[in-house]
Image (cartoon, rainbow, N blue to C red):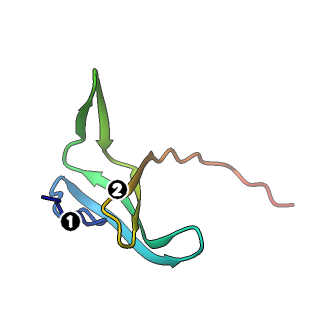
Amino acid sequence: MLKRRYGDRSEWKRVTDREYVQSFFDTEGFNGYVTLLKVNKVSAPLHVQYGDEQVCIVDNGFMWIQHFPTNERHSLTTIKRLRIKTSNPCFT
């Protein structure tokens, strides 16, 4: 049996502050929803075991970009940790 997943991950109680947007795309290369979940704050990071390695998949400052193709039984998830660099622009 397949589990239904939602891009906003509203069932994750550990995520205490989030931003979420979604858009539908109908292009030659992709048809379906693309979602962006920005995790601002969590009560505790989430680590999962991949083979011999522990991998953090949710923590403060993470972004999840998910592609949900129409009429398919799979999705693609990209997880990115935000590292914001501050720059000092100079205007003359």
Residue 38 in the image, given as x and y percentages of width and height: 38, 59
Q: Secondary structure at mark 1?
A: loop
- Quadrant of the snapshot with the N terminus: bottom left
- Of residue 9 and residue 30, the one placed in the foreground of this image is 30
Residue ID at (23%, 63%): 5
Q: Which residue is mark 2?
A: 40
User: Which of marks 1 and 2 precedes in the sequence?
Assistant: 1
The residue shown at (39%, 53%) is: 77
At which x and y percent is residue 87?
Answer: 66, 48
Residue where numbered disc 1 is placed: 10
Image spot of residue 70 (x, y percent): 39, 73
Q: Amino acid at mark 2?
A: Asn
In this picture, is 48 found above or below 87? above
- Mark 1 closeness class: few <14, some 14–19, many ≥20 residues within 10 Å: few
Image mark count = 2
Mark 2 and mark 1 residues within 8 Å of each other at the beta carbon: no
Q: Amino acid at mark 1?
A: Ser
* Closer-to-camera residue (78/46): 78
